Image (cartoon, rainbow, N blue to C red):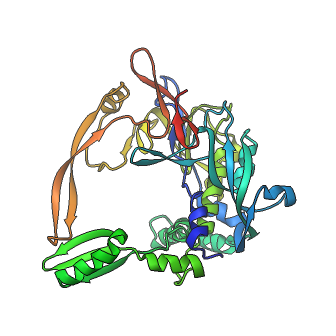
Amino acid sequence: MPQLSGQIAKDIRQSYTGGAVDMYIPTNEENTKIYAYDVNSLYPAQMENNFMPIGRPIFFKGDVRISDPNAFGFFYCKIIAPDNLEHPILQTHVKIGNDTRTIAPLGEWYDMLFSPEMDNAIKYGYRFEILWGYKFQHKILFKNYVQCLYNLRSKFDKSNPLNYTAKLLLNSLYGRFGMIDSFPDITIFNSEKSYSKFMKDHAEEVMKIVELGDKILIQHRSNEKDQQTELYGNLETHNVSIVIAAAITAYARIHMSQFKNNSNYNLYYSDTDSIYIDKPLNKSLVNNKVLGLMKLENVLNKAIFLAPKMYYFETIEGDIVYKVKGLKHEVELTKLDFENLLIKQSILEKFQDKWIRNISDGNIQVRNDLYTLQVTNNKRELIFNENNKLISTKPYKIADKDIVKV
């Protein structure tokens, strides 16, 4: 497995965009049920039987597929999305002001892509101009690892620690490969003189300054070390491999793309490994014992989706489930709260206790903070009806990573 660093790692990391989480339709009509499905171990399923990049990368310029139609690796491309996709399947990072968003847009842009994800997108009408990239050899690496741990997990009940341990090892390995291997240095200065001398020569490298009584702690990056890494490769071994992490997450997005733009049902919401639709899936796609197939988690009488990781459910059994990312579940929310937030420019304010640490003072405080809930347009453009009620969303259109009005 390639342990890459420097510019190659930075280039390939552009394709590491994570799972696709989007809200498409905010709520279901009366007498319409929502079927909530999760993939049974999405990332391990993709690790088990898919080819992973191995060996030394080979840099190329131009369209490598002309000379090598089966070239495998990471390609920097001009991407042209079809205009008619309701649920675009390729993600990219877009900077809006000081915020960086990950969206699945329409339009044209340039980006780094894993070649199997590019090939899958061609089936949906995407067009590509390959400009440069890195070729790799490929091999199935994780079959024995996944099968061993999945078999171990299946032998024990969910309450058993071995089941949970096996689950963690299966689901978290890909993220370990994707860790950033450029770690900052920390220096503690005992005198103002030594601190001032350091700042005079290295001020541009400083990331954080913390006063610790009569001492000063500085977190900083070493430009000299970065330059050596660029010239000679990584001088340390951190046991990470961004190409493996990027490949696994790309295969996961490929797997989930089959449930988008599907005329058999309406898609209300999708998360990294789940979908919420208004009809049952074909039975051939559902089996909660088989790795990579779907399992039916819930059937819902009512669902309200306000944004990624922000929703309210009423199950057919009468259970109420709600989630708001960043808000503790101890904070009570009601169906009416969520329904009111469907109205344009509505907000809901809640207070919650948060633990705040102060390194300089060496203490931890419990603070009652205000949390504001509202519908967001971070991922897709919101569509309201004549009564200012949110009824749908549509993808943003971009030109070279700038959002354009349509």
Vertical side of 277 occupied by 352: above or below: below
Could you tell me if residue 388 is visible in this image? yes
Q: Position of residue 195 (x, y in %)?
A: 23, 79
Q: Looking at this view, name the residue that lies furthest to the front.
A: 200
Residue at image location 22% in from the left, 56% down from the top: 354
Classify residue 66 as left or right of residue 140.
Answer: right
> Which quadrant is the C terminus positioned in?
top right
Could you tell me if residue 233 is visible in this image? no
Residue at image location 24% in from the left, 38% down from the top: 349
Classify residue 181 as left or right of residue 288.
Answer: left
Vertical side of 399 occupied by 391: above or below: above
Vertical side of 179 occupied by 188: above or below: below
Q: How many marks?
A: 0
Q: Position of residue 390 (x, y in %)?
A: 43, 25
The image quarter in which residue 210 lies: bottom left
Between 105 and 205, the one nearer to me in the picture:
205
> Which quadrant is the N terminus positioned in?
bottom right
Q: Position of residue 190 (x, y in %)?
A: 19, 85
Classify residue 130 as left or right of residue 192.
Answer: right
Q: Looking at this view, name the residue that lies furthest to the top.
A: 386
Residue at image location 39% in from the left, 48% down from the top: 98
Q: Position of residue 194 (x, y in %)?
A: 23, 84
Residue at image location 38% in from the left, 34% down from the top: 375
Classify residue 159 as left or right of residue 147.
Answer: left
